[in-house]
Amino acid sequence: MHPDIHLTLHHARAAELRAEAGGRGPVRVRSAHSLRTRLGWTLVEVGLRLATRPGTAAAAH
């Protein structure tokens, strides 16, 4: 099995999905930077909630 077989499979599936989409263009987000920033802050929020939840090792310190 070639190490890049997964990449080849992903490309094949992407081509199938593009064909099914019927020529519609990709959905545009405001910007990649904006998306990364929102994702980053969401992960920070989730981490803080997990760290301060009663019964966790982080909350006990």
Image (cartoon, rainbow, N blue to C red):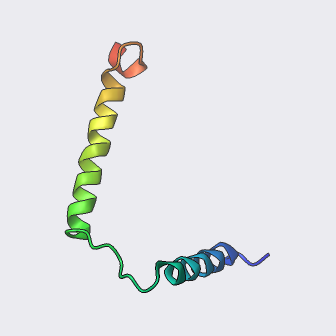
Locate residue 55: give its quadrant.
top left
- Residue 14 vs 33, above or below: the answer is below
Q: Residue 24's spot in the image, x, y percent? A: 38, 82
Residue at image coords 27%, 60%: 36
Q: Residue at x 62, y 81 (%)?
A: 12
Q: Is residue 13 left or right of residue 1?
A: left
What is the quadrant of the N terminus in the image? Answer: bottom right
Residue 61 appears anywhere in the view: no
Tell me: residue 6, above or below residue 52: below
Task: Give the percent coordinates (x, y) of residue 34.
Answer: 20, 62
Quarter of the image with the C terminus is top left
Labels in figure, total: 0
Residue 23 lies, in percent from the top left, at 42, 86
Q: Foreground: 24 or 57?
A: 24
Residue 40 position in % (x across, y down): 28, 51
Residue 8 or residue 51, whichever sits in front? 8
Closest to the observer, 24 or 39 = 24
Name, please, the residue furthest toward the right: 1
18 vs 11, nearest the viewer: 18
- The residue depicted at 42 percent of the width and 19 percent of the height is 57
Q: Residue at x 26, y 37 (%)?
A: 45
- Does 27 appear above or below 47? below
